[in-house]
Amino acid sequence: QVQLVESGGGLVQPGGSLRLSCAASGSILRIDDMGWHRQAPGKERELVAAITPGGTTNYVDSVKGRFAISRDNAKNIVYLQMNSLKPEDTAVYYCKAAVVPKIGRSLELWGQGTLVTVSS
């Protein structure tokens, strides 16, 4: 069974930093696009950052210059480095990956979510 497991959320003061990780496990042939989404209370889930297997990235405007997405293709891990955090970054963060398993069809998987709270 292929799954995504996230880690790294928590409570941080405004201006602080956090690093989220999301590891894919199982019988995986390859992983195509990976990304991080977030959902704040009372709001719709939004794409925060995405990265292709070759390393091309894109970001929502509100995090440009503060967040950085990266991936380790050998370990099937995607990271989100979050700097200069603001209270409005408070949300549950979810990773998403397009996974091609060794057997079976391609899957779009979501992690379980990790809570990031930015507050003094």
Image: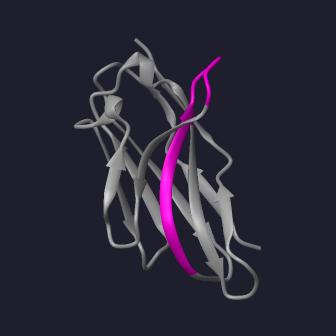
Picture quadrant of residue 99:
bottom right
| Percent x, y of residue 17 | 32, 34
For the image shown, how many numbered marks are present on the structure?
0
80 in relation to 25, above or below: above
Colouring: one colour
The span picked out in magenta is 30-44
Asked whether, in this view, residue 48 is left or right of residue 55, the answer is right
Given the current orientation, which residue lies at the most extreme top position? 120
Asked whether, in this view, residue 23 is left or right of residue 65, the answer is right
- Name which residue lies at 22% across and 37% down: 65
Picture quadrant of residue 13:
top left
| Percent x, y of residue 73 | 42, 75
Q: Main secondary structure of the magenta part?
A: strand
Asked whether, in this view, residue 88 is left or right of residue 56, the answer is right
Instruction: Residue 77: say if magenta.
Output: no
95 in relation to 40, above or below: below
| Percent x, y of residue 71 | 39, 64
Quadrant in which the N terminus appears = bottom right
- Name which residue lies at 61% across and 21% down: 43
Quadrant in which the C terminus appears = top left
- Name which residue lies at 73% across and 79% down: 105
Given the current orientation, which residue lies at the most extreme left position? 65
